[in-house]
């Protein structure tokens, strides 16, 4: 099967007009010695029925979806209303390019404008961009933005920032005049404030931390922000679980200068890690240093309201090496899904979702902590994730659970050697009470 | 025409489009105690389901898209996006998989990633591919980082990256983000890299040349082997921006022509939808020498099992979370398997045929700065129309009235007033002819009735928008009007 629309007669007429006898001749500019002499060694073409059988077989090799799972750690399961899939699969949204021709792209542009508004409302920031790739690269972009803003070189990153976000920041900054130092966590799972205070000095460009942090704990943003600001450092808050913004005060109201993170929770399935949706908002003074695309409102010649991509003098296609970022194609369709999701849930739904997450996670944490030998590792307040310490190797417990069709918490030893035998559990509104109880009794059995 | 309001303008207190089931665990009384809880999200939308559905349906109708018609954006490869690929990418086994699931429970996903990497190696003539980069620009950055890591290990990071003046803006931006200084290389009269200028600039402080091939004029850099030799002789690497790979599939493999690193845009050559600006995917392929530096994790086949390998001491690290835009890779794999080897070769053949048909048909009406043979795209300019005061923008906006999407404008920078046209292989002769006729009519109008071009478009949802005002007085979100 091919997707070519030319008949043999079409081809002949076209070749005649061009004045060549075969398509082959049109490649005359490619030297003979680098042309491929044989056919590509790839599987033979599959017509649609065969292709679907093939993919159904491939997809069914993923037995994970049949399991009851308590994984989170930067990828969250939330209910996605039917209208999200229905509306976001419209060809008019799926198949256009970046809206460089605004007169024929008002749908996409207005959606981006609404999305930017929603991100501002949720984060409490003045302005937001049209999207970035994901939470990890958005965090890296935030760190680079802070460096451009104040020219300082040292970044303090909480050890409880998602390990993959920290790794990504490390990769992005490695070849630039930015160094990243880690600030540990205290016994309650929050950032170690004393250590932070000690490490802060006039050379610090930014403090970046995540809340709720990777260990699930909600940080005292106000206090940390004040500390950072006392040393003229910018305060970057990364939010990996955007659903928390439905109930927790907007970071912008608590002193954040830049809020970035991952909005996968807003209408995007776990999808084995992507595509996701990086977001970023900041104070309006930082506008010229904000990376990525931005939609703005304007008027057409008749005075009607319309939207355009704007302030492109920040961007690579105009500024080339002096651009604020190299980002070009980003995650527009994911931002559309988030917009539909948020507008469908609305104020009441978003708050209800957040409350159910916090209640169910608390129920689960309390229930599991009653199992003999298990204790909650950190006393701090949490949203929908919490860390439990087990009396034996968690991997062994998880292996037992897997036999029973359950994927338990994420073993943290791989990311935090100091948290050996600890697991990060995530419970959201999709988990039923019976499922939580089942997890608890299976864990009980496994420890017996 | 009804203009769709912003959702915030139709929002009303207490309305809802969705309800959650009642909480089925005992509510804990002090669960929010001591937390900074928000009382309200001022002006957050409250609408009904039918309002949501009509809002987005109407907005969708204010978009042009590939499903509606011809979309000849140069260098963007706006080909038809097959619907079966969407179905494949929506299977629960893929969509519901958590990225940190135990590998034995997600063997299908790992197989997808490994196979698409293997197939890309075969198509591009490379030794290994990573699927992690989220888009072309992140692929470029990753590629530059791989080169830098390798050079640093040799004790010689170098300072400069060479980039032809015809290159896309992401190239210099990505090189800069990798800590390199950018040095431009001139194009010659034929529109290809000026070999003398390259040789002059190719010092032993140059880490790499970033080459787009075919370049942004649609011209194949026929000296690519000599270019590779010049770069390699000084210990540098040849990076190829594979944005225009649609011209080469099954015809020529960059790896056979001396390329050391390449990124390929799955959302261009392999037909994954552009989504109004992403998500895309920019996998990066390398030759053996650079393989140890690829991002973690790499997917490996060990016996009958697929596994994630994090134990790669020389890796550059990771450039994002997890394994890249996985569902984009699923779509690309579906596309490759549908086409098979012959179909993949046909991509390039027909894309080049369509492009040359347009070029030939319009060469008397529009100025062609470079007359070198072109492959999948051609770049005209507004030079002839300028005599009547008509710019490429006017031509583009007038095309909207004729029901087709304008070409890429004002790029590459080496062609003033550029109109860069890439038809792709999926278009019918009828659609090509509609475009050609429209372009001819516009050329005529430019002479006879230039005013109608300057005030175009006349038939669109909005008319020409004031982009200067948008930048001068930025309004970047909706805010309730303050009562005075």
Image: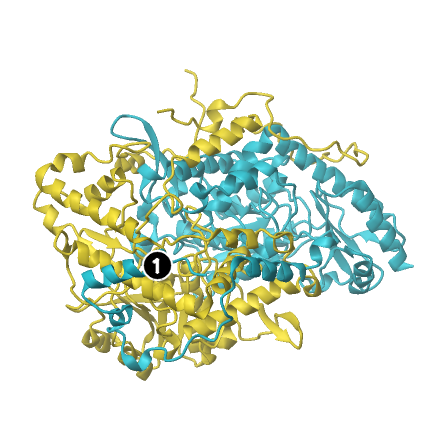
Chain colours: A cyan, B yellow
Which residue in the protein does label 1 denote?
Answer: B425
Left or right, residue A403 beside residue B110: right
Left or right, residue A367 beside residue B185: right
Q: Which chain carries label 1?
A: B
Front residue (pair B202, B25)? B25
Task: Judge whether A441 appears above or below A342 on screen.
Answer: below
Front residue (pair B256, B411)? B256
Q: Which residue lies furthest to the right in this view?
A: A448
Residue A150, horizontal then vertical, whole percent: 41, 50
Instruction: Check the picture and name the quadrant holding the C terminus of chain A.
Output: bottom right
Mark 1 residue crowding within 10 angstroms, few (<14) / some (14–19) / many (20+): many
Q: Which residue lies furthest to the top in this view?
A: B484
Left or right, residue A294 beside residue A72: left
Front residue (pair A37, A374)? A37
Asked whether the viewer can see residue B258, the reply is no
Q: Quadrant of residue B206?
A: bottom left
């Amino acid at each position: 099967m091919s997707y070519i629309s030319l008949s043999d007669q079409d081809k002949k007429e076209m070749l005649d007009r061009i004045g060549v006898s075969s398509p082959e001749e049109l490649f005359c500019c490619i030297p003979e010695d680098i042309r491929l002499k044989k056919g590509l060694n790839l599987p033979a073409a599959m017509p649609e029925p065969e292709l679907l059988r093939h993919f159904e077989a491939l997809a069914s090799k993923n037995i994970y979806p049949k399991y009851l799972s308590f994984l989170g750690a930067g990828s969250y399961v939330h209910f996605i209303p039917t209208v999200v899939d229905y509306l976001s699969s419209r060809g008019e949204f799926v198949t256009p390019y970046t809206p460089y021709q605004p007169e024929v792209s008002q749908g996409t542009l207005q959606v981006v404008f609404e999305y930017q508004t929603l991100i501002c409302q949720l984060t409490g920031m003045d302005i937001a961009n049209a999207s970035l790739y994901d939470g990890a690269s958005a965090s890296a972009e935030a760190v680079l933005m802070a460096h451009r803003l104040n020219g300082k070189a040292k970044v303090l990153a909480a050890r409880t920032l998602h390990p993959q976000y920290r790794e990504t920041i490390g990769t992005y900054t490695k070849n630039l005049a930015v160094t990243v130092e880690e600030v540990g966590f205290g016994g309650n799972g929050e950032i170690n404030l004393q250590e932070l205070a000690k490490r802060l000095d006039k050379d610090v460009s930014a403090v970046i931390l995540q809340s709720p942090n990777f260990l699930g704990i909600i940080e005292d943003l106000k206090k940390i922000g004040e500390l950072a600001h006392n040393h003229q450092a910018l305060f970057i808050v990364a939010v990996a679980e955007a659903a928390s913004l439905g109930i927790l005060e907007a970071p912008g109201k608590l002193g954040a200068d830049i809020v970035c993170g991952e909005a996968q929770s807003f209408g995007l399935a776990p999808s084995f890690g992507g595509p996701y949706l990086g977001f970023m908002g900041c104070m309006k003074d930082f506008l010229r240093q904000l990376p990525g695309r931005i939609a703005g409102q304007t008027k057409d010649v008749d005075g009607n309201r319309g939207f355009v991509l704007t302030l492109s003098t920040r961007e690579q296609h105009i500024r080339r090496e002096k651009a604020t970022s190299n980002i070009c194609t980003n995650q527009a369709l994911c931002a559309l899904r988030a917009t539909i999701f948020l507008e469908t849930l609305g104020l009441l739904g978003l708050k209800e979702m957040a409350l159910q997450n916090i209640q169910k996670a608390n129920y689960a944490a309390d229930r599991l902590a009653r199992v003999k030998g298990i204790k909650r590792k950190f006393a701090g307040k949490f949203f929908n994730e919490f860390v439990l310490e087990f009396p034996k190797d968690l991997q062994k417990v998880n292996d037992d659970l897997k036999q029973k069709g359950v994927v338990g918490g994420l073993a943290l030893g791989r990311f935090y050697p100091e948290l050996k035998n600890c697991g990060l559990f995530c419970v959201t509104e999709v988990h039923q009470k019976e499922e939580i109880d089942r997890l608890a009794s299976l864990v009980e059995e496994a420890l017996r | 025409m009804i203009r769709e309001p912003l959702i915030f303008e139709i929002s009303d207190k207490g309305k809802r489009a969705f309800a959650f089931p009642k909480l089925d665990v005992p509510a804990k009384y002090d669960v929010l105690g001591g937390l900074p809880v928000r009382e309200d999200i001022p002006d957050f939308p409250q609408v009904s389901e039918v309002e949501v559905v009509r809002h987005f349906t109407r907005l969708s109708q204010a978009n042009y898209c590939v499903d509606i018609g011809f979309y000849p954006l140069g260098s963007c490869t706006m080909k038809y996006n097959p619907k079966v690929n969407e179905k494949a990418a929506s299977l629960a086994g893929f969509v519901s998989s958590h990225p940190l699931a135990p590998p034995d429970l997600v063997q299908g996903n790992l197989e997808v990633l490994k196979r698409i990497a293997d197939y890309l190696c075969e198509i591009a003539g490379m030794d290994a591919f990573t699927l992690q980069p989220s888009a072309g620009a992140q692929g470029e950055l990753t590629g530059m980082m791989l080169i830098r890591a390798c050079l640093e290990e040799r004790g010689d990071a170098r300072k400069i990256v060479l980039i032809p003046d015809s290159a896309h803006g992401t190239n210099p931006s990505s090189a800069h983000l990798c800590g390199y200084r950018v040095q431009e290389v001139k194009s010659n009269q034929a529109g290809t890299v000026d070999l003398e200028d390259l040789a002059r600039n190719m010092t032993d402080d140059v880490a790499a040349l970033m080459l787009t091939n075919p370049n942004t004029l649609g011209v194949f850099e026929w000296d690519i082997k000599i270019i590779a030799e010049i770069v390699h002789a000084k210990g540098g690497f040849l990076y190829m921006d594979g944005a225009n790979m649609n011209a080469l599939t099954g015809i020529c493999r960059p790896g056979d022509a001396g390329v050391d690193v390449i990124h390929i845009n799955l959302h261009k050559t392999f037909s994954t939808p552009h989504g109004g600006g992403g998500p895309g995917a920019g996998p990066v392929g390398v030759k053996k020498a650079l393989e140890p530096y690829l991002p973690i994790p790499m997917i490996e086949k060990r016996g009958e099992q697929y596994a994630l390998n994090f134990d790669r001491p020389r890796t550059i690290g990771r450039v994002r979370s997890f394994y890249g835009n996985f569902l984009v890779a699923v779509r690309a794999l579906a596309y490759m398997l549908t086409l098979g080897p012959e179909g993949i070769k046909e991509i390039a053949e027909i894309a080049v045929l369509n492009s040359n048909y347009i070029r030939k048909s319009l060469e008397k009406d529009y100025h062609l700065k470079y007359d070198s043979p072109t492959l999948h795209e051609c770049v005209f300019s507004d030079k002839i129309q300028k005599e009547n005061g008509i710019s490429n923008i006017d031509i583009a906006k007038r095309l909207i009235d004729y029901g087709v999407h304008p070409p890429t404008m004002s790029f590459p920078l080496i062609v003033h007033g550029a109109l860069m046209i890439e038809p792709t292989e999926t278009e019918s002769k009828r659609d090509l002819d509609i475009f050609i006729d429209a372009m001819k009519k516009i050329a005529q109008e430019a002479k006879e009735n230039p005013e109608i071009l300057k005030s175009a478009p006349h038939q669109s949802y909005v008319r020409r928008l004031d982009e200067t005002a948008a930048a001068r007085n930025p309004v970047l979100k909706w805010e309730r009007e303050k009562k005075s």
